[in-house]
Amino acid sequence: MSNTRTETLTLLALTFVVSFCSFAYEFVYSELLTVMYGGTVTQYVITVGLYFFSLGIGAALSDDLNADEHGENFFRTEVLLAAAAPAGFLLIVALNSVRIPQAVPSELIWLAARLPVVVVGFLSGFELPLLTYLVDELGEEDAVTPARLRRFGRRLHDATVRCLGVVWTVERNDGRRSGLSVVLAMDYVGGLFGAIVYAKLLYPGLGLIPTIFVLALLNGLAALVFVVRFGGWSPTPFAASTPLVGRVPKALLVVCLLLTATYAGAVVNHETVDDRLSELYLEQQIEDEYRPGTMRAEVTSQETTKYQHVVRYRRTWTGSGPNPHFTGRSERCLRLDSAVQMCDSWADSYHNGLVDVPMSLFERGPETKVLVVGGGDWVAVDHLRQYDVTVDQVDLDARFMNRTKNDSFFRRWHDDAYRYDRLNVTVGDGYRYLQQTNETYDLVLLDVPGATDDDLLTLYSEEFYRSVRRHLSEDGVVVTWAYSPDDYPEHNKAFLNTVGAAGFTRQLPYWAVEDIDSDGDVERVERFYVFAPGERRSLPVADGTDYVRRYSDRYRDARWRPVPRYNGVRVNSIFHPNYDILVDT
């Protein structure tokens, strides 16, 4: 193989790598912005739009770069990308980790969080034109690709032209083509691989933080390979016969070496890097939920399953005066993704509200059939076990369910409820389960995450609640926890309109209560709704469960009410989402 051909193949390989990185950066930023600000569709659409806009600006300005220094400019571009992409990632994290003065306009923060997308897109816009110039500088077309690849390309081209001829008038062009066609093809292939590898390997296998360092490492290596292979001064035996780059600034070369070495270390130790950076961010996020200086958070463990990020942490009261949040100075808590799911102080009272209050409406025995959607921590099943009912449970995250079986934090609350002899467990999507099963239930408990992400919109859709209604027995009801209408009025209106559109006409709202901070006063812990498609019996406080009788003064006035209908508020549907139903916690 001729030197020119191997040199061209090197450039095409570099095209593949840098395109791979460029497209993957776009997905990393999209997902990071989704994690930080919510709204999957919104963040991905805006990120992709900004990226391609910036890409076009960079490509347009590439003609203004010095035509005698295409090689040097390509090297500079890769070094800048290797530096800017991780820096932009950390900037977005920082914007969501530090307390920003309220005087700073939210629009300014929004723009700052998208600045990394613009920078990476702009720099990536230089890559394709510069690589095209460099390939054209190497010489004849026959040197661009190996003979076998050229023959395959011609056959593919002939077949494509024949297909085009079915609809369009075509004229076969056998003339010489510039390097643009080959570089452009390799760019698209690299982009495709970037998307696939990110979605199937990098993100699920490593997570966002290690992935950004893997991509930056590839940019750094691409810069070093280029300068070693095509530098006219390169002392290595791999130096090209046709130098494409002159002297590069020593400072820039040193920066490239340092960045590459740093990223290599971060990739080798990716678990440590991921854990430490995640902990710093999460601890700051948790502390920011309270008044400054009143709460300290310490992440004790975290893992990412296929479906969620599971974080365990300890929160410690550091404020002056009595602790209004829980008994004692510290307690353990669990977060799934961005929302707190359970803490020692209210884990029991939450499940009292979810299970023990509505169970007052039904017979305690195996003839009562209950469906639990979610509840992978098994605590709801433990409460149901006390009433000897028949339970079907469906949860998506098998890994989380298996981990919680023997974990000391969860065992304190579920008491090995997964061994309950009247429990049938299905691992799968709750909505799909309802579409496929023929079972009917007296009580459906929705122990699911809050509406904080686009991925959860299905569980808050008209279609989902219609499926639930179809599987209720004659006197059946569905129970779910809910955000306070005072704190999230737009969500509450959209949610109630959606439930009403699904055929539920009656609601029984109530609060789970407990003295969670041992100050002698009973506090509201969590709000719940019981929904029914028709009239139902009143809550029998005197004959209710132990929990309802204990707090009879709080439940004596609980009454069924009509499900309201709010004018001008759209129903949330799978095919026509109402994003007002999402909340920013």
Image (spheres, rainbow, N blue to C red):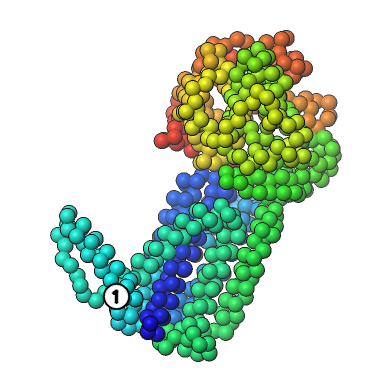
Reply above or below: 279 against 437. Answer: below
Instruction: Tell me the quarter of the picture where residue 1 sits.
Output: bottom left
How many residues crowd mark 1 within 10 Å: few (<14), some (14–19), many (20+)? some
Q: Could you tell me residue 564's position as x and y percent?
A: 51, 20
What's the residue at 58%, 17% (across, down)?
442
What's the residue at 54%, 41% (across, down)?
453
Q: Is residue 542 left or right of residue 458?
A: right
Q: Amino acid at mark 1?
A: Ser
Q: Could you tell me residue 15's position as x and y percent?
A: 42, 70
Q: Is residue 245 left or right of residue 489?
A: left
Q: What secondary structure is marked by label 1?
A: loop
Residue 516 visible in the snapshot: yes
Residue 486 visible in the snapshot: no
The residue closer to the viewer here, 245 or 294, is: 245
Q: Could you tell me residue 531's position as x and y percent?
A: 56, 20
Reply above or below: 453 against 111. Answer: above
Reply above or below: 201 against 247. Answer: above
What's the residue at 58%, 64% (across, down)?
213
Instruction: Tell me the quarter of the picture where residue 220 sits.
Output: bottom right
Q: Which of the image's four quarters has the C terminus?
A: top right
What's the residue at 62%, 14% (across, down)?
367
Reply above or below: 577 against 241. Answer: above
The residue closer to the viewer here, 479 or 119, is: 479
The residue closer to the viewer here, 475 or 53, is: 475
Q: Could you tell me residue 580's position as x and y percent?
A: 50, 36
Q: Is residue 284 left or right of residue 59?
A: right
Q: How many marks?
A: 1
Write down the residue under mark 1.
178
